[in-house]
Image (spheres, rainbow, N blue to C red):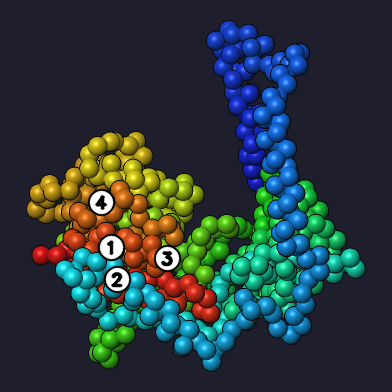
Amino acid sequence: MSPPFRRTKILTPMRMATTLLYALTATAARRSVSVAAFRCVPRLTRPPAPSRSRTAAAGRRRRRRSEDAAAAPVRRTEMVPHPGSGPEISRVRPDDYAALLRAKVAVLEGRVRDAFSASHPGNIPARLPETEVFESSRAAFRMRANFKVWRTEDGSAHYVMFERGDVRTPHEVAEYPMGSAQLQGLMGPLLDAVRTTEELRERINDVRFLTTLRGDALITVTYNRPIGEDWAAAAGALSARLADAGYGAVSFVGRSRGVKLVVGSDTVRETLTVVPPPAGDAAATHRASLTPRLRYEQTEGAFSQPNAEVCEKMLGWAADATRGSHGHDLCELYCGNGCFTAALAPNFRGVVATETSKASVELARRNLAANDLHNVRVARLSAEDFVDAYAGVRTFQRLRDARIRLVAAGTPPPDGPPPDPDGVAVFDRLRTLFVDPPRAGLDVTCRDLARTFDRIVYVSCNPETLARDLTDLAATHRPVRLAAFDQFPYTPHLEAGVVLERRR
């Protein structure tokens, strides 16, 4: 039996304009204003002719576009086949893994050393803590992956990817050893169904896989045409066949312009173990006995760490770095779906976390509730707005709605547990700041905020902007821990973690 599906309406700009027009019309009727005032009136007069200078400028722009188009490389109309393998971007090289990781770690250490050396007299190289390096599995490490679908004239279809620096040449992906075992197992049956089912194949654009360690799978398929109940029926039949073949419950999301169809669910469940860093045998055994297993929901289209195994190590490192902090509170910016929040909350008296996305805030609250964590409050607030709220410059209704009261930095905290009048959580001992910002890093306002904290735990997906931010924080804080997490093997990318403490 095919799983049920639901249709989700997406507000396109045209629908938003129509909705606004209806709202204005209703308002006008209530206020006895003529509805004609809101009607579109056709222009009856001819627009003024463009000036000669504008005409000449437009001609020059057209010529430049023509010259640029002639000089640009022509996009290939044929796919580059890779039978039995794949393009360089999809290959694994286990024999080269150690050397590639060492090179990335050396670059990270150089950037961090330079950041702190800039604050030393005479540019004496800064002394850094030994880097804690967390490796990835050599293969089958990616829980999610996106592929374009290349359709040929004979009705066949192929997964394709594009090499770094070349977005014009599609390369066939016959196999994807980077993907999780579940992801790799689903690639073939899905492509076979696309090739043999017109409703799934017609004007297909791309396919996005999302899998989890606990065995859930969600496949999103996008189209350059409208889709409806016929597509949902075909996707439901495929989901049923996959279940019968032993792949478990596989959900599908179909997307086309203004339409989202869900067959099954648009969320998956994940369970992550907070893995403590390596230590002496006795300490490791003790901590392993206390290691929590955290439950999460991940939603279609939202961010999640692609390498779940390394994510578990990141959670364990961050939890270990903040252990023994029950006497004060944690501030977390950019909390996303609460991935780190759930791992860090048991270490603190209270946690206030912020995120700009409304969907992510709701997801974070569900994930915290699923893990029975009640000392956390999540607010939909940008990092910049939090800075103003914490300084007492502005007040925000969203903080009041989340029942959060911030006590400005420098205010002496009272003795005893945090006051909780009428269910309002009062954060008056914010001494640790945790940030996991986007690739752009922290802006000047957030770096100014960071200087007010005794301890900063900074997880970065971009060592370049991390180094810039550390240069700015080096005058007030010193590094006590440095970590490298290989979230993306065989690429130049490296996740980093730094713990900073205030200089005395």
Distance in Å between CA atoms under marks 1 and 3: 14 Å
Q: Residue at x 65, y 39 (%)?
A: 12
From the image, tell me which residue sits under label 1. Answer: 471
Q: Nearer the viewer, mark 3 or mark 2?
A: 2
Q: Position of residue 208 (x, y in %)?
A: 65, 64
Q: Amino acid at mark 4?
A: Asp
Q: Amino acid at mark 2?
A: Asp
Q: For this view, does 429 lie left or right of residue 137?
A: left
Q: Earlier in the sequence, mark 3 or mark 2?
A: 2
Q: Nearer the viewer, mark 4 or mark 2?
A: 2
Q: Nearer the viewer, mark 4 or mark 1?
A: 1
**Which circle marks residue 448 in the picture?**
4
Q: Decide: few, some or many residues near mark 4? Use Cα within 10 Å; few <14, some 14-19, many ≥20.
A: some
Q: Amino acid at mark 1?
A: Thr
Instruction: Evaluate if marks 1 and 2 touch, with contact meaning CB atoms under 8 Å apart.
Output: yes
Distance in Å between CA atoms under marks 3 and 4: 20 Å
- Label 4's element? helix
Q: Amino acid at mark 3?
A: Asn
**Which circle marks residue 462 in the picture?**
3
Residue 20 sits in which quadrant?
A: top right
Q: Nearer the viewer, mark 1 or mark 3?
A: 1
Instruction: Evaluate if marks 1 and 3 touch, with contact meaning CB atoms under 8 Å apart.
Output: no
**Which circle marks residue 114 in the picture?**
2
